[in-house]
Amino acid sequence: LCRGGLAERLCRLQNRERSAISFWRHQCISDAKMPSDKSGVLIVKILEMFEECTIQVAICQQLEQSPATLSSEDAVINAREPILKVLFARETAAHLKSRPQDVIHIYPPWQKLLLKNADVPVIMNTYFSQKVLLSEHSETTEKTYGLTKMLVRKNIVSLAQTFRLDDLDDELRQESSDQVACAPQIHNNCDLKQHHLALSAVNDSLLEMVESQGAVGWREAQVRVVIQRVYCLPAREGHRSHVQGNKPLWMFCRLCLLVQDAYGMFSEVQLQSLSSADNIEQYCKRWEGKFCCLAGMKILQRTTRGRALGLFSLIDSLWPPVVPVKVPGQSQDSEMMTTNLPPPSFCYILTIQSGEIHVEVDEEEQIANLYQPPAVHGLKEILQIGGCNERCSFWAQVLYLRLQAKHNIPINQREIWLFVTDSMLQNVVHNTPKVVAVSVAASCVLSTEITEALSVASQLVFFRDALWGNGRIICVERTVLLLQKPLLCSAAGADLSELTGPVRLDELDSTTQANSICAVRGTVVGVNESTAFSWPTCDRCGNGKLELCPQDRGSLYCSQCSEVVISPVLKMQLEVFLSCPSRSQSTVKVKVGLFVLINMLLSLQSYEVQSVLGKEVGLLNCYVYSITSHPNCVGLEEIVLL
């Protein structure tokens, strides 16, 4: 909105008006009684109701008094006063839930409008209205109408009738005049949900729904949207509860939908909390790309690009729309609706309300034209993207998994590093790494299926909507890792074939960076025997921090498996120094397992460790944990690929 313009001033006025109404209603509820000041209060009894142009029109009789002790039949009717036509806005009508014979108090500043050639005055500005529950009928009314739905007659007013055009369709006039008011009906439980949805017109605009229904919630309305993405977010009370071996597990997460309406506007819908993200793959298959109707929503937050960079990076990846979208207030010319559309600058975060109909997904319906499936790229293409904070989706073979080694960070909040490759990277000769490191942030929810599969063997994993920027691929909130290929995705020329031959790593050279994996070969120039040590690990989960069993001090106990370790696996390690031609200016220090050294000693038929000096070491797969320039040293640790 233009600063200081009429639209901005009107928006502020409407916000103040909504705040005043909400405060007044809250005050009435807190006081548990009607406002004491009766001056200027208009008391009416509803005789008939109908809806016209989203406004609820009530034909009322004015009352002189409405004591709580009187029944509605005994309420005094002022015969001298004409019948009144009272207009209630949609929000006010939803709050009052009025029926014929109800008594309403309308507080100032209501206004009376006298129309030319009309005998019935119109009462407007009825925002400060309250229904009177008469003592003898309040309990009966609640019991009678508890499961009923008031069907309100809707008058259809055509534009031809409004502008008095000569070619007015007689059938439409007849249809409008033949409508009659419907009495309240009680439906059985199986029909109640169907009736609820049939009564409220389905809207196609999220923004119009939010503006008309307000922040409190959508009670009598629903909006039809397309589900673009399904994912899990960590619940506020959620965290990675523990790490079983190399398997971080989430205890609580919240199922979320990123939806888009016919006007291109996005909203994030936060559904129920889940104990884990195990069913996320099924939700993605069943719901993504389908239409759904949202009802019983309330607004958690209106967020902007500056406050939610992660959310808007996902929205930007789905913009512009693939098909024409509606433009508010403009003729629906298809050429005007797809070009020069500015990306959304704000987004509403919605959540469900208890006791309401929430989300209805039409799983039988075809995929919506507005749906944009993830565009799958090869890792080589992603590494060449020049932008920052770009969402990307790709298939990759996970070769090695490593937990962040910062000991000052709790183990359930550390990021995980996945080292991945694909067939395109494996076939590249120069200038492109054969393996890429993918950081999985603590906020990225992983399913048990993913973590268990990666703890057993190398897996082909689909990374959906990961974040690329500053030379790194990061899995953050709203990134989903799947083991199966999604039903809908566009490959855009990416080679999605699986690896067939053995995996090759980049050899250690001057371009090797810390926090990467590589292959190293060289000559042994030194052995640091003082660093040799061994430790027992759990034969089930690989946990290297075993404890003495409380019941049997001679046995070892694994706290992650919560079981006694009968056959621990002994691991051993020491440091050797290599001279590597590919990194001749650096001291290369490798933490190797003792079985490498033992094999060398056996081949030499010697028991002296020093006898391995000058011997060649084959291609060792190593993790680069440090690179320093003063002194010029490279720290490596021998690893075993999945």
Image (spheres, helix red, strand yellow):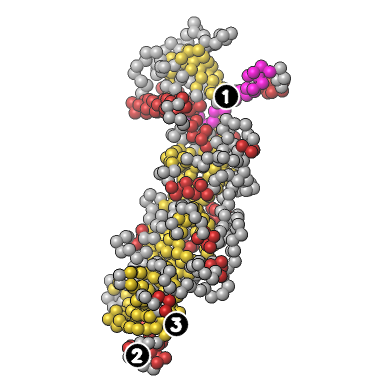
Q: Amino acid at mark 3?
A: Gly
Asked if residue 197 can be seen in this view, the reply is no
Q: Earlier in the sequence, mark 3 or mark 1?
A: 1
Report which residue position mark 2 lands on: 611
Disc 3 and disc 1 in contact, CB within 8 angstroms: no
Report which residue position mark 1 lands on: 53
Q: Nearer the viewer, residue 122 or 208?
A: 208
Disc 3 and disc 2 in contact, CB within 8 angstroms: no
Mark 3 crowdedness (10 Å alpha carbons): few <14, some 14-19, many ≥20: few
**Was residue 583 drawn as part of the magenta stretch in this picture?**
no
Which residue is depicted at the point 54% across and 48% down? 318
Q: Which segment is the magenta one?
A: 140-165
x, y percentage for residue 38? 37, 15
Which residue is situated farthest in the top direction here?
A: 80
Identify the secondary structure beneath mark 1. Answer: loop
Quarter-wise, where is residue 138 in the image? top left
Asked if residue 336 can be seen in this view, the reply is yes
Determine whether 291 is above or below 153 in the image.
below
Quarter-wise, where is residue 586 in the image? bottom left
Q: Amino acid at mark 2?
A: Ser
Q: Amino acid at mark 1?
A: Cys
Q: Earlier in the sequence, mark 2 or mark 1?
A: 1
Q: Which mark is residue 618?
A: 3
x, y percentage for residue 411? 34, 62
Mark 1 crowdedness (10 Å alpha carbons): few <14, some 14-19, many ≥20: few
Which residue is depicted at the point 52% across and 40% down? 342
Determine whether 343 is above or below 242 in the image.
above
